[in-house]
Amino acid sequence: MDHITIDRLEKYIRTGDLDTVYGFRSMTWAQMTSVLREVEQKGRLSPVDQWMLTDYGIEKNGWQLYSYMQVGGIVSRSNPARLLETDAWMNPLVNAQQGGRFVAGGHILNIEPRLVLENAKWFSLDLWPQIRMTDDQTWDLDMFQAVLKVGVHNLELAAGQMHFKWGQGRHASMLFAGSQKPLQMIRLQNVEPTLLPGWFSFLGKGKFTLFFARMDDDQALPGSLLVGERIAFRVSPVFEFGLTQMIQVGGQGYPDVPWYENVSEVLGYRFNANETNFTNRNAMFDFRFRIPQWNNLNLYGEVFLEDCCNINFDKNIGNMLGIELPEVGRNRATTIGFEHIRTTFVYNRHFRYRSGFIYEGISLGHHIGADALGFYGFIMQDFANGFSHEFLGALEVRQVHDYSSRKNDIRTIVADYEVRERRLRGAYQVKLHFSKQWTASIQWGLEYIQGFDFALGNNKIFAAGRYQLEYSF
């Protein structure tokens, strides 16, 4: 699914019109037909989303070829900054939830044609190349996503390079927040939430995901394997929760142990507790609670455990909390929200894996890094004529306590560290759906940084603009 469709569909969860655990980002277009029909039957489908139902509705078991073209680019005066004690870089002014497309500044022309061949019941092939031209007139060709999916009943097996987003936050999710690059993986999941049998039925409809991804070679143990597990349940129409675990095992230099010991390690049991731990692990609990009596007010959050071996609030446990008032009004629907994130001094850091949970130079978690906090406020308006706009304000402080991953002074590890970094950022986006197929958007952003890259007196003002024209047929 394209990100515009996803954003528009996820609002129906926040208003309680979709009785399903979130997960649209991995659905095929054919699977979205039944989801849209569900909202339409309740009489809640907006005029703009009615277009989507017309576009995506296909015959059951029929073959369909979808095409999607995105042409745009960025004009940016901004530089990436380090995540200390890792090999990662961040530039949220241009890469927030952009899948690692843009990290450096400058002028980049970006063209993304996308072809999806699928059968509504059992097959999908998704090819999504990315063509870029940079300031020096150099053309680059990459594959943003290339996925083959096959399904049997409600199970789906996917293989290829995939981008996805987990967690509850729009701007402050602590794991797979959307800024990370696509991973090469094999993934197994159930497509639509399923009611568990017997005594477990009290958990409501549930969804599971299991994937195996190969990490890049820039690791302490090159080519290690990343195993991701997630289960999520919608206990009632007003409450849902999810449990996630990530573990990094294997790679060059990893001990030669029997396969069943690696399996038990993934499940949380180690045969010999005295052995050197070559794994890297984190876990997350997330939840969302909706209050229908207060205009479907959403309260949501995430609790993140780094290496999750000891419950130490100072070291291991970070958190994200959010509040959102969705879809106030009908013809001029307004959504207002606020999110807060706090990371500990070991977040995405590891004494053995120098890159932590980093893939190709970008964090698999939130871009803010360790020992940091962030505040995010957003206002979105969606008009009946297809016009929408959004404002985001952000305040971020990195290296709040000047801690290293061992809770020592960071200067003992990073010799050129001088001062914590403070960021104040604002972004405004205008989007217009001026036909079923055509969408245009423009975004402006401005960021003031005090102590850029942790250097005393190194204050910066960065600016960026993004333009985009999209056509689907």
Image (tube, rainbow, N blue to C red):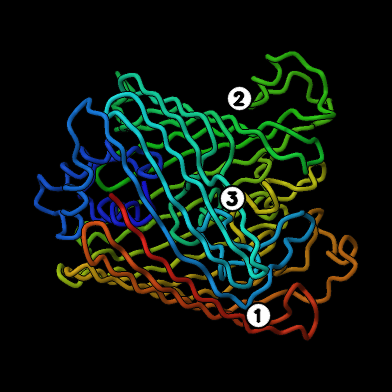
Q: Looking at the picture, how far across and down is residue 448, in whole percent? A: 61, 82
Left or right? Give the position of 189 relative to 176.
Answer: left
Q: How many tags in the picture?
A: 3
Looking at the rendered structure, the kind of residue marked 1 is: Ile
Return the residue at label 1: 449
Mark seen at residue 259: none
CB-based contact (under 8 Å), mark 2 and mark 3: no
Question: Mark 1: which secondary structure?
Answer: strand
How far apart marks 2 and 3 lie (CA) works out to: 39 Å
Above or below residue 276? Residue 145 is below
How far apart marks 1 and 2 lie (CA) works out to: 42 Å
Looking at the rendered structure, the kind of residue marked 3 is: Leu
Q: Residue 22 sits in which quadrant?
A: top left
Return the residue at label 2: 267
Return the residue at label 3: 141
Q: Looking at the picture, how far across and down is residue 408, in whole percent? A: 84, 60
Q: Residue at x 47, y 48 (%)?
A: 165
Frontmost of labels 1 and 2 is: 1
Q: Label 3 crowding class (10 Å Cα cut-off): few <14, some 14-19, many 20+? A: few
Q: Residue 450 sits in which quadrant?
A: bottom right
Q: Looking at the picture, how far across and down is residue 155, in whole percent? A: 37, 23
Left or right? Give the position of 203 relative to 92.
Answer: left
Closer to the chain start, of discs 1 and 2, is 2
Q: Residue at x 63, y 41 (%)?
A: 282
